[in-house]
Amino acid sequence: MRVNNIGIIGFGPRGLNVLERFIELITRYGITNLIHLHIINPDKPGEGSHPSSQPEHLLVNTVSSQITMYAGDSLALKQGGKSFIQWARSEGFKLENDTFTKRETGTALTDMEYMPRSLLGTYLQDNYDRLLNLLPENLKVIEHKQLAVNLIKDKQFSVILQNGDILECDFVFLTTGHGFRKPTENDTRLTRFRDAYCGSNPLLGYYSTPYPITQLDAISAQSHVLIQGFGLTAHDVISALTIGRGGHYRKAGNRLEYVASGTEPKIYLSSRQCLPFAGRGINQKGLIGRHIAQFLTPAAVEVIRQQNISELQTQQIDFESQILPLLIKEMAYAWRCAEAQKYLDPNTFVPEKEEIEKIERVLWPLRGQFFDDYQSYHNFFIELISSDLKQALLGNMNSPLKASTDVLRDVREALRRAIEFGGLTAKSHRYFIEEFNPIINRVSFGPPLRRNQELLALLDAGIVELGGGPGAQIICDESKFRYVLSCEFDQQHYEKQVDVIIAARLDSYSPLTDASELTQNLVKNGLIIPFMNGNYHPGGIAIDKSLHPINVSGQTEEKLWAIGFLVEGAHYYTHALPRSHINSRQFEDAEICVRDCIDHIISQNEFVVNKIEELI
C-alpha cells in the first residue's frame, strides 16, 4: 500500500493539535491508509514558545485549570488526558514560598494558580508522549530535529531542511507559531548607535526582543535600562531583572515589599500610551462560566451584515459605528448586573449616560487628562494601578469594573464574526487592529494581579520608575554616549538617560516582515501572499475558509494548510491555548485541516484503484 507522507513544519501546541486530530479521526473512522507524519522542528516536540528550560519565574497568563491539550470527548482525553492543573497535581506539584515544588511540605494547588511557563512546556511534552502511545498501526511519526528553510512545490512538496536534507511530502501543514521580525528603521537606528558608541560606553545595549530571556543576564547592574512596553512581555523582562537576579518579595500588611539582591539594574518603563495593563480579576465564574452576551452576539453581527448588503450593497461592517456601540452597551449591562448582584432583563436595559462614561474612562483613561509635570503623571499612574488592583481583588463578578472588562474576552466569537476574512471595512479594520485591539489587551488580557502588586512594590523600592509619560521619544545622544528618553508635559520638559533599551513586545506575523528564511522562501516561491483587506494588511497570510494558503496566482494550495499565528489577519485571536470544557477554536481549526487532508488521501487512493481496475 502506498505511504502518504505528511510534513508538519513547526511543532508547538498547534502541531500537537494536528497530531491529535489525525489519531482521533483515523481511529474513529477506521481509516487504513498508511500515513507517515514528519515532524520538522529543532526543539523538543510540543513546547513551541514555552520551553521547559526557561526560568521558573516566567508565568503563564491564564489560570492553569483553563488550559488543556485534550479536546472534549476525544480518544486522547478518555485515555487519561488531563488539563494543565490536573497534570500538575498528578505529578505531585505543590506550592511553597511562591515556588512550585514536589516537596510534601507544600500546599495543594488550587484551580486558580498561574503556573510557570516552564511547567507548561513539560505538560506539552507529556501530551506529545501520550499521543505517541495512542498511534494506530497505520500512522507513523518521524521526527526531524531541524529547521525547515524552504518549501518547493512540484508534483509533491520538497521540504528543504537547514542541514541540506530534503523531505518529499504529499501534504504539508504550516504550524510555525511565533517568530521574529526583520529589523525596522528604529531597530537599525538604535542598533547602529549601540555599535558606534559601545567603546565609549560599554554599558550600551539594544535588544529588539527579550527572548530568549537568558540573554538579559549580560546586562550590568550598573546599567540604566528602559523597557518599552507594559504588557506581558514587559512583566517577563521585569521579572528577569529582579527575581531572576536573586530579589524576592515579602508580604507587608496587604501589600508586597521587594527585597533587593543588589544586582538589579535601574529600570524605567515607557510606552506610547504609558498606561499599566489591568490585572486579572479573581475568577469567580468557575471553569466554564462566562458572561452571556445579550447585545453583541454572532447573530447581531449577521443582522448588521445583512442590513449592509441590503442598504449599502456591501458585506463589510464599520467597527466604530456598528460594533463598538453594541460592545459598550454589553459592558455597561455587565457593569449594572454586577452592581445589582443579579441578572437584569436585557430587553428593558438602556445604558445611562453615567454608565457609558464609566466604560469610556476604562477604555480611554487619558481622555480629558492634562499633566503639568512628571510627578503629576506618576501620581495618576499609581492611582490607576492601585484602584485597579482593588477591583481585581473583588473578583470578576463582584467588581462592576472587572465584570465589564471580562466582556471583552467573552464576546470574542462575535468579534471574530465581524472581523475575519475582511468582514470590516479596510478603514475600520485598521482602527480595530492598531487602536482598539491594544485597548482590549490592556484592560482585559493583562497579567495576573500578583504582577501588578509586584510592580507597585518595585516602584516603592525605587528599583523601577516610570520613563516619562505618554508620547515619550527616544533620542540617541552622541555627546553622552547614551540613549535619552524625552517627554513633554504641560509645564515640564522631562529627560532621562539610559544605557540599555529592551523592546518588550511580541512581533505580529507578516510575510512582509518575518525574518525567517522559510517565510522569505515561501513568498519567493509564490506559495503564500499577505492577507489584504482592500489596501490594508492587518498581518498574516491569505487563506481560504479551509485554511489553505492562497498563492501568488490567487489559487488555493489544496495540499497545504496554515494554522495559528501565521493566519492572524484573516483570522482573529489565534494565539491562545485551548480552554478546558469548551470547543476551542484551536481544535476546530485542526479538525478542518486534518479532515480535509484525510479526504484528499482517501479520494486519491480511490482514484488510483479505479485506474488500476480500468487497466485490468
Image: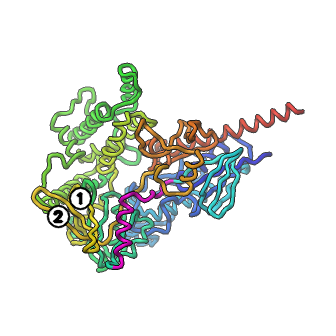
Q: Which residue is drawn at the image coordinates 81% and 36% (left, top)?
A: 609
- Place of residue 50 in the rendered image (x, y in percent of width and height, measured from the top left): 48, 61
Q: In the image, is residue 253 above or below residue 581? A: below
Amino acid type of the residue that numbered disc 1 sits on in the rendered structure: Ala
- Tell me the distance, in whole angstroms, between the alpha carbons under discs 2 and 1: 9 Å
- Place of residue 273 in the rendered image (x, y in percent of width and height, measured from the top left): 25, 53
Q: Which residue is drawn at the image coordinates 26% and 64% (left, top)?
A: 475
Q: In the image, is residue 437 above or below residue 376? A: above
Q: Is residue 213 left or right of residue 235?
A: right
Q: In the image, is residue 391 above or below residue 559? A: below
Residue assigned mark 1: 472
Q: Which residue is drawn at the image coordinates 71% and 38% (left, top)?
A: 602
Crowding around mark 2 (Cα neighbors within 10 Å: few <14, some 14 to 19, many 20+) is some
Question: In the depicted view, which residue is nearer to us: 539 or 115?
Answer: 539
Q: Quadrant of the N terminus?
A: top right
Amino acid type of the residue that numbered disc 2 sits on in the rendered structure: Tyr
Q: Is residue 202 left or right of residue 420?
A: left
Labelled pair 2, 1 in contact (Cβ < 8 Å):
yes
Circle on res. 494: 2
SS class, disc 2: strand
Q: Residue furthest right?
A: 616
